[in-house]
Image (cartoon, coloured by chain):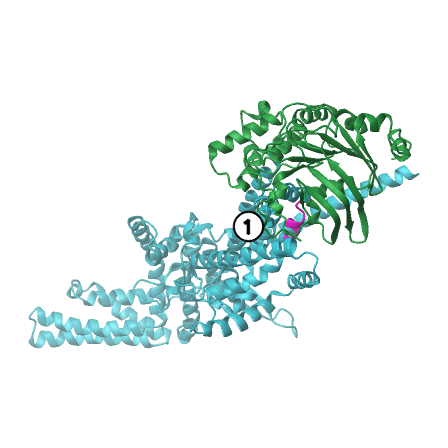
Amino acid sequence: MKNTRREIQDRSFTFFSSLSIVLMVGALVIILGPMLRRGFSAVFFQGTVEFRRMQLAQFGHGDEEAVADEVAQVTELRQEIYAILNKFQAGIEPSALIDRVRSINREYGQELRGKNIVGADYTELRRRARDLRDLLQDALESTDRELVEANLKSVLQHRADPLYTDSVMAEMFVTARQYQNVIQGIDLSHREQYLEPLLEVKDQLRKLLGPMPGEQAPLLMEEYGATRWDIALETLHDLLWQEQWVTVEAGQELQKQLVRREESQFAGTSLAPMFGLAEDHLTDLLRPKRTIYWHYFTDDWKEGHFFGGVGPEIYGTLLITLLTMLFAIPFGVISAAFLVECASEHISVKIIRICVNTLAGVPSIVFGLFGMAFFVLFILPNLDRKPQGCILTAAMTLAVLVLPVIIRASEEAIRSVPATYREASLALGAGKFRTFMTVTLPAALPGILTGIILSLSRAAGETAPILFTGAVDMGPVPRSLFEGSRTLATSGYYIAVGDKIGMMAPHKQYGLITTLIVLVLGLNILAILLRSRMSRKLRGQ
Amino acid sequence: MTKLSTPAASSHLFDFKGTIESKSKTVTTPNPEQTDICECSVVSAKDFSFYYGKTTGVKNISMEIFPCRVTAIIGPSGCGKSTFLRSINRMNDLIPATRATGILEVNGQNIYDKRTNLVNLRQQVGMVFQKPNPFAKSIFDNVAYGPRLQGIRNRTKLEGLVEECLKSSALWDEVKDNLDKSALALSGGQQQRLCIARALATNPRVLLMDEPCSALDPLATARIEDLIEQLKTQYTIIIVTHNMQQAARVSEHAAFFCLGELIEYDLTPKLFTNPSHKQTEDYITGRFG
């Protein structure tokens, strides 16, 4: 029956419209959710002591005393790890030890002379010391385990000799003893095989905890360890686990497998306990703390987005957007007013309207090329300036981009003001211009504002038009309008396209995009509030 | 087709500032032959025709509107009542591709003359529209809009003028407490009275009313009709209406239009009780229209 068919139609209409809204919201949540979450982690994260150290040294944020305190505490703990590391390194690369042993011998000679022991005693003592030294040196250099063990043993026999108690020779015995411990698990004949893995481990450790005391870091990036807890955990994982390619099945491709280093590379050596130590005490070593990095929005970045914030990008985006609106809004509204009020029926107006509507759909890259050709390569030289992109040309290009949208929306808004408003004003003797300014324009303002809001969001996030007309990927914060600037959108592009360092800090990329989204959202909300206030005033509330 | 007014040539056209002599304080009997204090007819049409492109709006209208009277124009839809009314203050200029022939005079001056000062004309001939259309401003700014156009800036003077006009349109008591309230917050009847006050503020000689009560409820309509009764002692009022009872109530003269032509123009009692033309009789008795 007819009634049920209409009912079915109504119900399914409601159902499908609700479904589409649910799908849209779901898509937004799924797509934006992880991105926003990671972006927020650029500001809300767990920062380690390295982060606080970096903030203080590079940007001057933070309490000097507190940071120094923390660093001191942490350094104490780290000593243990470094000690194990150094000893092990000495064990497989005894060249430093050998040099030290030789210099001990020389110092002993000086010591004897200082004690005024001369003549036959001097020679005898020196001879004994030299013997010890040779024994030890052979032990250090040799890869024959039996020889090494024997030499070390004979050296250590003299350890308790009171002759050497207060002397610098005591250190020789300490060295021998340590070396004895260290070589326990090492395959002496293949000492070199430990070198490369050791360097790997040292690298990871440096990424985790920062440079070892006494080491210099060539790059700014390497001066600090893991600044964020999540990065620290990742680095720890790389430290503890090693990737190996193994044959799982004969004839098949090699498969990647993860094995713990202490079981594969350093099994049985004295370095093995270090891994457990690092793993268990990582919290104490790095002291992660919940951080809200407010300065993210004002700090510049250092070392290719690895450290720091996005301050200059935000500044650039806001500046360019503001300038774009300054150019586009007056032009757009006045053009729309002209099209509606003054020249409504002429054929030329129809042609102009078609052109405007077409321009509104032109791809933004075309505007970028136009901007480069016209503003950068033509106008700038005429103003005696170098033909390179700057904030001014970027803003003008974006203004040309958003102009059609503003014109279209304004035209609609002005046209939709009821004729009775105009008639009332004209009937009182007002002229056309007066009527427009005092009656038509205020009534059309909500619609015009809608067009402005839409183009504001577009201008803030556009990448292609400003790539050649004003955006740069690095450089100082611009001081004049004739310099190029970084912006949120273009920085995101540059990182994605090839900035390897930026790729190492993915939270930065997400942070950039999230900042852009939040910025545009904020601008929109502001403008929507403004528009609703105006609407309410127009309706008389 | 707008005015070109040079001060010397045409500023004397419709240049009535200050007191208007033709305001009569006594109620005169509705006899067009009787000499009034104001002697000449206010609006005079001689063979006036108006065309929208190819369509005829009105054709060969010849009538004289008398001062300090209420003249009602009645007729079926599309007969040209509003066209004629809007021609009197040249509001039809807003519509493109229109043409007027014949003579239409206000206060003795042909308003379709090229030298007419439109601003002055529209300040002399006020208009109230069918749907109340106050501006989205305060009540005060609405009424003061006209005087401000005339160049009156003195705040005290404006306040006095606004008060006078609001009193004339019987709105003062209701809004005097808060003149800064938005005009859109008033009820329909109040808005229409506000529009009347606004039209009065420019000190016009003629008040054109295009179906002023058709968007209002009966109570508000009654108040507007009372208002018209009061105003007619000072202004010349031409009212277009669909409502024949209203026409019979408020007007002294009535004109019946049909299909763009003036069929009959006579004193109201006579037109409604004893019309001369059959078409008028048919319309009034409801046989058509």
**Could one spot residue A459 in this view of the protein?**
yes
Asked where in the image residue A92 lies, by quadrant, the reply is: bottom left
**Is B257 drawn above or below residue B8 in the view shown?**
above
Q: Amino acid at mark 1?
A: Ala
Stretch of the chain drawn in magenta? A411-418
Pick the residue in front: A538 or B150. B150
Q: Position of residue A414 (x, y in %)?
A: 64, 49
Asked which secondary structure carries label 1, the reply is helix
Q: Main secondary structure of the magenta part?
A: helix
- Whether residue A50 appears in magenta in the rendering, the answer is no
User: Which x, y percent locates residue B138?
Assistant: 56, 34
State the quadrant of the C terminus of chain A: top right
Query: Local crowd at mark 1 within 10 Å, few (<14), some, or many (≥20)?
Result: few
What hue does chain A carry in this figure? Answer: cyan
Q: Nearer the viewer, residue B241 or B254?
A: B254
Chain ID for green: B
Q: Is residue A356 above or below residue B162?
A: below
| Vertical position of residue B146 compared to residue A448: above or below | above
Q: Is residue A510 found left or right of A405 in the rendered image?
A: left
Left or right of A526: which side holds B185?
A: right
Q: Position of residue A44 (x, y in %)?
A: 47, 49
Farthest right residue?
Answer: A1
Q: Which residue is mark 1?
A: B8
- Looking at the image, can residue A309 be seen? no
Please state which of residues A332 and A425 is positioned toward the viewer in this rendering: A425
